[in-house]
Image (tube, rainbow, N blue to C red):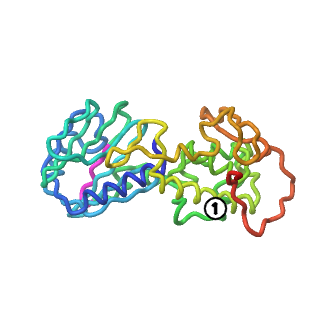
Amino acid sequence: MPELPEVETVCRGLKQHLVGATISGAEVLRVDSIAHPTPEEFENVLPGHTILDVWRRGKYILIELSGKAGLAGHLRMSGRMIVVKKKTKASKFLRVRILLGDGRELHFEDMRVFGRLWYKAPKQKWEEVVTALAELGPEPLTDWTAELLGQALAKKKQAIKSALLDQTVVAGIGNIYADESLFRAGIHPLRPAGSLKKPELERLVIEVRKVLNNAIKNRGSSFSDYTDADGVNGNYQNKALVYGREGEKCRVCTMKIERLKIGGRSSHFCLECQPLKVKAELKPRQKPKSRTPAR
């Protein structure tokens, strides 16, 4: 599933291509791709709106339309939102076509049909239409702190890896970047979430931000079906330190990367760099160290 960096990359591309464009029509080719309202209403209410802005909340794409209306999307496992030129041959997985006044089209493609689109009427709030938005935790790149993370994890016995995937704890982080962040912070994915000390929480928040920003610079990862708004794959997977590298040598200590299942999800880690047993008292480091590859 596309995570925060992939969705952020898509939003930036859509914003560049779509702001100022007017919607001239909409065609729903797969009815279950529309979460709200009905497919017929969706086709009728979109035309005439001008696209004013595009941004991200968690893994959701939010498109602001004129008249205080809006369009939201979630890519789920295999969804794509791409802008194509007039007369471009459509993919066989095209589910929704949105026509623009200049002849271009915004295509919502989805091979597995798990992705969804929502239309927000002018008098509605985003959370009233996309109810999951109200449950999202803080954004890791902006309003997230070690204090907030500590409060969210207090007394939690679940593995820290599972806690990072909980969208009510922090929004947008998924499997790939949770593994990468925990490795760089030197925290084993099975550590009980509530056992992390203040220095570890501070280090983890710092490393999450570094990992996510680095992934955004590389336009996300393309382990699955993800592409950006231009249909281009991401490149972060080629820079991953642990994810997808089971059996390979750790780039920090040369031990082999291991993999185990936590909450049904694969987790990659280095037992040397991320020891499971830690001392009861951890002395704060003056500057949190990143787990960077040895040269």
Which amino acid is tagged 1? Ile
Q: Position of residue 27 (x, y in %)?
A: 17, 40
Q: Position of residue 141 (x, y in %)?
A: 53, 62
Q: Looking at the image, is 150 positioned above or below residue 177?
A: below
Q: Which residues are magenta?
A: 117-123
Q: Observer-nearest residue: 105 or 42? A: 105
189 over 100 or under it: above or below: above
Q: How many C-alpha atoms fall within 10 Å of the one at disc 1: few (<14), some, or many (≥20)?
A: many
Q: Which SS class for mark 1?
A: helix
Q: Which residue position is annotated with label 1?
A: 206
Where residue 148 sits in the image (x, y, percent)?
62, 62
In the image, residue 79 above or below residue 155: above
Left or right of 156 in this view: 57: left
Q: Residue at x 67, y 57 (%)?
A: 204
Q: Residue at x 25, y 61 (%)?
A: 19
| Side of 55 relative to 294 (left or right) | left
Residue 69 on the magenta span: no
Total numbered labels placed on residues in the image: 1
Residue occupying the point 69% across, 58% down: 290
